[in-house]
Image (cartoon, grey):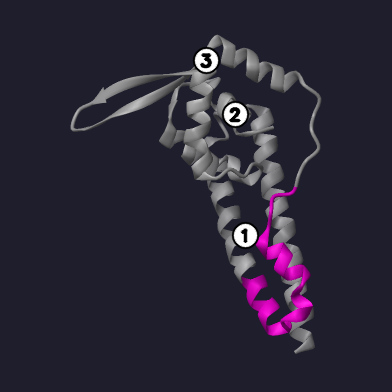
Amino acid sequence: MNSQDVILGMLMKEALTGYEIKQLLENVFSNFYSSSYGTIYPTLTRMEKEGLITKENVPQDGKPNKNLINITPKGRDCFNAYLLAPLEGDRIKKSDFMMRLYFGEFVGYDKVIIWLKQAQEESHTKLDQLLEQYSLYKDEMHPAQIICIQIGIEEYKAKLTTIAEGLVRLEELL
């Protein structure tokens, strides 16, 4: 799986702008796919050169024109080939928090507690976002998409439970 596969999948249902693709990557897909903003437009440029997508310049009243990105038949074939290929093993995203936490013995309990509380707050925010997206779109979602969102929700709940238990243990040591 790479950015191209994800973008082609987004375009299977409807044409999107680069901004809309960025929003989907930051919101819906951020739970299970990490992509930097800087890779989106170079990937789109390459995909257009390869004939996987086309861009349509759409005029807007009082606003700059927007580029609507459409998938081509070649792009659909490429995406379908990705879907039919064997599953790849999951890779854990890079996590600065997890790396620092692992080496937390070198900074003391106070600093580790600060990191845990920060991760707890961020995880609550992301869980709330997922729950909101789920409640807004669940009636329009395919059952497979619902399962995907539910897995993300349960992962954040498990992370929050583990952080809360860890905070209790560390605060007892102070």
- Residue 51 disc label: 3
Q: Which residue is mark 2?
A: 4
Tell me the tag on residue 42.
none
Query: Which amino acid, mark 3?
Result: Gly
**Magenta stretch?**
92-117
Q: Earlier in the sequence, mark 3 or mark 2?
A: 2
- The tag earlier along the polypeptide, 1 or 3, is 3
Residue at numbered disc 1: 123
What is the count of numbered marks? 3
Residue 43 visible in the snapshot: yes
Contact between labelled residues 3 and 1, with CB atoms less than 8 Å apart: no
Q: Main secondary structure of the magenta part?
A: helix
Pick the quarter of the image with the C terminus.
bottom right
Give the amino acid at mark 1.
Ser
The alpha-carbon separation of the residues under discs 1 and 3 comes to 39 Å
Q: CA distance from mark 3 to mark 2?
A: 12 Å
